[in-house]
């Protein structure tokens, strides 16, 4: 997606490197800390570029939805 927006070269490689092979672990109050889990999607929480990257994703999503007709679900559709 970023390449389609003109982001290329070293900057794109740097961003890809930041997110490549990203891992996390979860601290459970009763069971302790898990082993490393691989992250394969999403943005890093607290990372300075995350809001920008998420905004670019939303802009691309909006572009795909633009011009399509869709109805917002009603409460009856949501079985509330």
Image: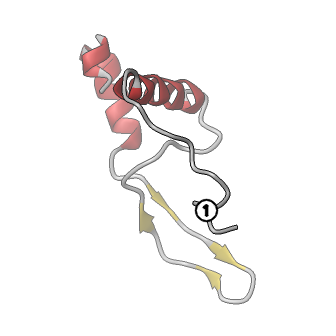
Work out which residue is located at the far top of the displayed protein and give it.
6
Residue 15 is situated, as x and y percent measured from the top left of the image, at 38, 29
Q: Quadrant of residue 48?
A: top right
Q: Secondary structure at mark 1?
A: loop
Residue 37 vs residue 62, the one in the foreground: 62
* Residue 1 vertical placement versus 37 (above, below): above
Q: Quadrant of the N terminus?
A: top left
User: Badge 1, how many Cα within 10 Å: few under 14, some, many 20+?
Assistant: few
Task: Give the left or right position of residue 31, taking residue 39 as reference.
Answer: right
Residue positioned most to the bottom: 30
| Residue 34 picture location, percent across and down | 55, 78
Q: Compared to 20, does 62 lie above or below?
A: above
Q: In the image shown, does 62 or 58 lie closer to the viewer?
A: 62
The residue drawn where x is 37% and y is 28% is: 68
- Judging from the image, the colouring scheme is secondary structure
Total numbered badges shown on the rendered structure: 1
How far across and how far down the image is residue 38, in percent?
39, 62
Q: Quadrant of residue 12?
A: top left
Q: Could one spot residue 7 in this view of the protein?
A: no
* Residue 63 visible in this rendered orientation of the protein: yes
Where residue 72 sits: x, y (%)? 56, 42
Q: Is residue 15 above or below residue 39?
A: above
Write down the residue under mark 1.
Answer: 78
Q: Quadrant of the C terminus?
A: bottom right
């Amino acid at each position: 997606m970023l390449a389609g927006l003109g982001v290329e070269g070293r900057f794109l490689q740097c961003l890809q490197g930041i997110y490549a092979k990203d891992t996390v672990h979860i601290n459970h109050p009763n069971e302790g800390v898990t082993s490393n889990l691989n992250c394969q999607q999403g943005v890093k929480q607290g990372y300075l570029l995350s809001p920008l990257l998420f905004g670019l994703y939303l802009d691309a999503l909006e572009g795909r939805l633009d011009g399509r007709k869709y109805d917002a679900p009603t409460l009856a559709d949501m079985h509330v």
